[in-house]
């Protein structure tokens, strides 16, 4: 079989030029200059027949003449459909998304898959199974052709880049023959697989089962035409839905208040505290990216108790924002957000930046291995002695066994966990010799309050058991978290420029 014979036969079956190239297994750029590709493949076609997909002729109004609709793609690759598609996207909410990259997700009628099989069977009949065997599809699949042909055209017309993680344009395409042909497919399916009780007709089923090896031409033809029948109507654009990308915004927060919960604190339907770290940050950052705040997830590398501050470099956090309207954040904008959060007086943030989603693993994993740095203000019943001070200078790490504290038993299971304490350093307050300032470096997940007083022996050893005296904790600060993420950025700097 010569390429010319194949193309002449396909043309006689009402197959469009783009699809003819699919049956010549053209790749990538070969669809850009179709004339050249046909020439290279030794195929003569009428020159007027060929329109290069990117043949811009925007000045002229589209001709209203009715062109025959391709029997295999139903006009999916026609200029008319492309113009219609671009127009529909432009009329959608598209302009409200400020995303550099886009990706198309097209839902196509099932009949396209049926027609692919029908043409496969037709080619076998015409040219023999030695030329078109049962196992290897004769064409470049429509799905792939959409990527090769439609994607680049739509991207260039909309002035966007292709980006699998960009704004997703969901396009639902229908055709008037779909209902009738799927009904016939259901009958065919019953006849082809009589043993099976009820099989759901799906794309997956068509991909797996609907091949010449499983469906014989004679049976297929009882229900559907070989080669595929001509159609009168063009494809219909049923709907266009836009789904913005998932954007992750990371930073570090300092918690400056001893009366602030991490996330909204609600007990039996009542708010215990008016605000939370999560809300203060989300309210200032998320509106830049999204119209609604309910598609925003706040995560951080661990958390503090309500009455614990977090100082030093602060704690890494990230907001995961679904269906984002935009995916970029300038340093000026970031700085404005940082200032707005700072004005709360309760939380301060810095290093605010958009990060790749893969980097969320920094927050999500390895939590237990991280070191945490604490400063605790503690009180003894009597003035400190030199012996106590000496005992509380520990530079070698040791392991404690810690039972789940009673105060968190309502939300955590009862376990005894070993935790590493890497060092303890202590000094005395100048004003009050009963007050100690104890710096502890510990494994993440250590309950520091219980480490200090021992909670009736539920944590051993404890600061209390080490000195052999009762000791209580008055205030606790987190002063360092051993996670160098996200990267340091000084958003304030740009304002000077
Ligand atoms: Zn076609």
Image (cartoon, helix red, strand yellow):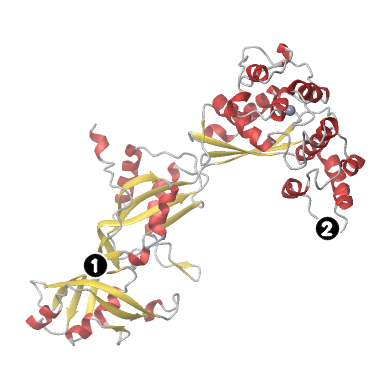
For label 2, count other residues whose C-alpha is less than 10 Å away and answer few (under 14), some (14-19) or many (20+).
few
- Residue 346 visible in the current orientation: no
Are the residues tagged 1 and 2 within 8 Å (C-beta)?
no
Q: According to the image, label 1 marks what residue?
A: 374
Q: Quadrant of residue 119?
A: top right
Looking at marks 1 and 2 on the same chain, the residue that comes earlier in the sequence is marked by 2
* Residue 226 locus on image (x, y percent): 86, 34
Query: Eyeballing the image, is 290 above or below 408?
Result: above
Counting every numbered tag in the picture gives 2
Ligand 1 sits in which quadrant?
top right
Give left or right: position of 294 versus 225.
left
Q: Secondary structure at mark 1?
A: strand
Q: Is residue 227 left or right of residue 138?
A: right
Front residue (pair 419, 413): 419
Asked whether the viewer can see residue 453, the reply is: yes
**Residue 213 point in image, percent of width and height:** 80, 46
Q: In this view of the protein, which residue sits in the foreground, 468 or 308? A: 468
Q: Quadrant of the N terminus?
A: top right
Name the spot of residue 355 as percent of width and height, x first: 39, 46
**What residue do we see at 26% from left, 41% from top?**
492
Question: Residue 48: which quarter of the image?
Answer: top right
Q: Is residue 331 above or below residue 313?
A: above
Closer mark to the observer between disc 1 and disc 2: 2
Q: Which mark is residue 198?
A: 2
The C terminus appears in which quarter of the rendering?
top left
Residue 58: x %, y % from top left: 62, 15
Vertical order, 381 against 217 (above or below): below
The residue positioned 58% from the left and 25% from the top of the image is 29
Q: Is residue 276 above or below residue 488?
A: below
CA separation, marks 1 and 2? 63 Å
């Amino acid at each position: 079989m010569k390429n010319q014979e194949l193309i002449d036969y396909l043309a006689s079956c009402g197959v469009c030029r783009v699809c003819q190239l699919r049956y010549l297994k053209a790749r990538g750029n070969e669809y850009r200059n179709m004339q050249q590709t046909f020439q290279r493949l030794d195929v003569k076609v009428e020159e007027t027949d060929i329109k290069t997909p990117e043949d811009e002729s925007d000045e002229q109004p589209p001709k209203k003449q009715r062109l025959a609709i391709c029997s295999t793609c139903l006009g999916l690759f026609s200029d008319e459909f492309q113009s219609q598609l671009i127009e529909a996207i432009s009329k959608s909410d598209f302009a409200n998304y400020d995303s550099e990259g886009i990706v198309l997700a097209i839902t196509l009628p099932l009949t396209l898959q049926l027609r692919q099989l029908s043409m496969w069977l037709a080619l076998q009949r015409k040219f023999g199974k030695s030329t078109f065997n049962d196992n290897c599809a004769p064409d470049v699949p429509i799905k792939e052709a959409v990527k090769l042909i439609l994607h680049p055209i739509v991207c260039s017309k909309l002035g966007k880049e292709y980006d699998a993680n960009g704004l997703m344009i969901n396009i639902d395409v229908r055709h008037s023959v779909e209902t009738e042909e799927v009904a016939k497919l259901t009958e065919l399916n019953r006849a082809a697989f009589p043993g099976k009780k009820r099989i759901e007709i799906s794309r997956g089923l068509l991909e797996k089962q609907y091949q010449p090896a499983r469906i014989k031409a004679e049976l297929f033809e009882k229900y559907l035409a070989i080669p595929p029948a001509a159609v009168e109507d063009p494809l219909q654009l049923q709907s266009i839905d836009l789904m913005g990308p998932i954007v992750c915004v990371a930073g570090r927060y300092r918690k400056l208040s001893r009366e602030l919960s991490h996330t909204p604190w609600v007990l039996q339907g009542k708010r215990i505290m008016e605000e939370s770290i999560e809300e203060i940050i989300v309210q200032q950052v998320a509106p830049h990216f999204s119209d609604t705040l309910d598609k925003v997830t706040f995560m951080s590398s661990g958390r503090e108790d309500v009455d614990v501050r977090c100082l030093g470099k602060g704690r890494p956090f990230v907001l995961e924002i679904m269906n984002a309207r935009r995916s970029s954040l300038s340093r000026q904008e970031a700085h404005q957000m940082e200032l707005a959060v700072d004005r709360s007086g309760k939380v301060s943030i810095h290093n605010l930046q958009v990060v790749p989603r893969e980097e969320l693993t920094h927050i999500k994993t390895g939590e237990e291995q991280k070191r945490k740095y604490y400063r605790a203000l503690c009180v003894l019943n009597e003035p400190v002695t030199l012996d106590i001070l000496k005992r509380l200078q520990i530079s070698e790490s040791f392991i404690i066994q810690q039972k789940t504290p009673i105060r968190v038993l309502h939300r955590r299971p009862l376990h005894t966990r070993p935790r590493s304490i890497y060092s303890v350093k202590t000094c005395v307050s100048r004003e009050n010799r009963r007050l100690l300032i104890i710096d502890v470096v510990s494994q993440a997940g250590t309950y520091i309050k219980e480490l200090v007083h021992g909670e009736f022996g539920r944590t051993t050893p404890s600061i209390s058991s080490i000195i052999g005296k009762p000791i209580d904790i008055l205030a606790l600060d987190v002063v360092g978290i051993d996670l160098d993420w996200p990267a340091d950025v000084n958003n304030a700097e740009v304002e000077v420029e």
